Image: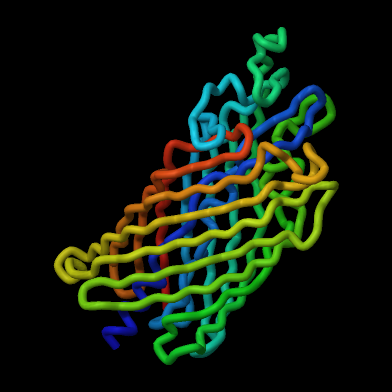
Amino acid sequence: MTDLYNLHKIATLRFLSTTMTAITIAMIPNMASACACGCGVFNLGLPGLPSTFYKTKISLQYDYMNQDETQHGSSIVSGNLNPDKQIETNFFNLNIQHMFNHQWGIMAMIPYWNRHFATDGNGTVGFTDASQGVSPQILTSNATVLSDIRIMGMYTGFSTDMSSGITFGLKLPTGPTNAGNYYQGGPIMDRDTQPGTGTNDLLLGGYKMGNHPDWGWFTQILWRHALDSYQGYRPGDSVNLAVGAHYDGIETSTHLIPTLQLNYQWRGHDQGGGDAAYGNMNSGYSNLYITPGVQIDLSSKWLLNTAVYLPIYRYANGYQQVAHFMVNAGVTYQF
């Protein structure tokens, strides 16, 4: 039972993968934007690895990200080279997981976004306003709406301890693609910064976890692929990988479980603008984050978690807005 409980603790840790999602779509006349929506940052593993101790788990997670600096390649550059200035988002995710038996389960993520977006309506990607002979025209937009829901199945029957499994499912086009304020007949938010992509996306993944005296580990991977396009827009494929560990040696005395993980994410170019062969040239990235965190066991059924995502390597195609760091906090009830 101790081993099963240790595995259950792994499943309740919220290890997510990575960093910015970046793209360029011209949604407003005279505006060629380059911005990173970040909507894939906190998706890996939601609502957590399968629990081996409880049948049902309900989790409410909060994530914060403020993208206010410009990345070009592997370097931070002047924000004057990117029309987009700030993308500040509060993510609220309701995650539900249920195991029907020892082999099969289902999970769903219902995301709700609060996003503030600021961009220069006269800006051109890669050039300053001064070099183009124009003055800045700052436009802002705000949206508080439902985003794209994810529904996934789980198979955990490879071993009796449920320490490995596969996940499979869909991201559904439930979020709007035209949210926020409008300017000159179109939404100010670029297509990639919208709460919804408008596409049905295939989700395939897998995980492996293990335990040793006083500590445990896990690795997880998730691949996302758009099955269609919407109004000419198709998000690029993405691969998320997380490798993590937790220390259980002080849990009995403190109810604390320190955690540490590495999060890697790759995303390809989006389609729907820019180069005909390669898509939006200001989209696509490769990033690596180190993520320290802690889980607090309030009881056997109630858990708190928090983590900070710190970039140690980032590469962005073109010019994209990125965050200095991201934070996560949540509460989980399992029964």
Q: Image quarter for residue 166?
A: bottom right
Residue 170: x, y in percent?
68, 67
- Residue furthest front as drawn: 277
Q: In the image, residue 203 lies at what x, y percent? A: 64, 67
Q: Residue at horizontal 17%, vertical 66%? A: 250
Looking at the image, which residue is at 34% across and 84% down? 4
Front position in the image: 281 or 119 = 281
| Residue 104 located left or right of residue 230 | left
**Can you give x and y, in whole percent of width and height, for residue 71 in the image?**
54, 33
| x and y, in percent, of residue 201 in the image | 71, 62
In the displayed image of the protein, which residue is found farthest to the left? 253
In the image, is residue 227 above or below residue 292?
A: below
x 63%, y 45%: residue: 284
- Residue 200, picture quadrant: bottom right
Between residues 162 and 295, which one lies in front from this camera angle? 162
In the image: residue 332, left or right of residue 269: left
How many numbered marks appear? 0
Query: In this view of the protein, which residue sits in the foreground, 218 or 268?
Result: 268
Q: Quadrant of residue 218?
A: bottom left
Residue located 42% across and 74% down the image? 334
Image quadrant occupied by the N terminus:
bottom left
Looking at the rendering, in which quadrant would you find the C terminus? Answer: bottom left
Q: Is the image coloured rainbow, by chain, by secondary structure, or in one colour?
A: rainbow
* Extreme residue in the bottom direction: 160
Q: Is residue 12 left or right of residue 26?
A: left
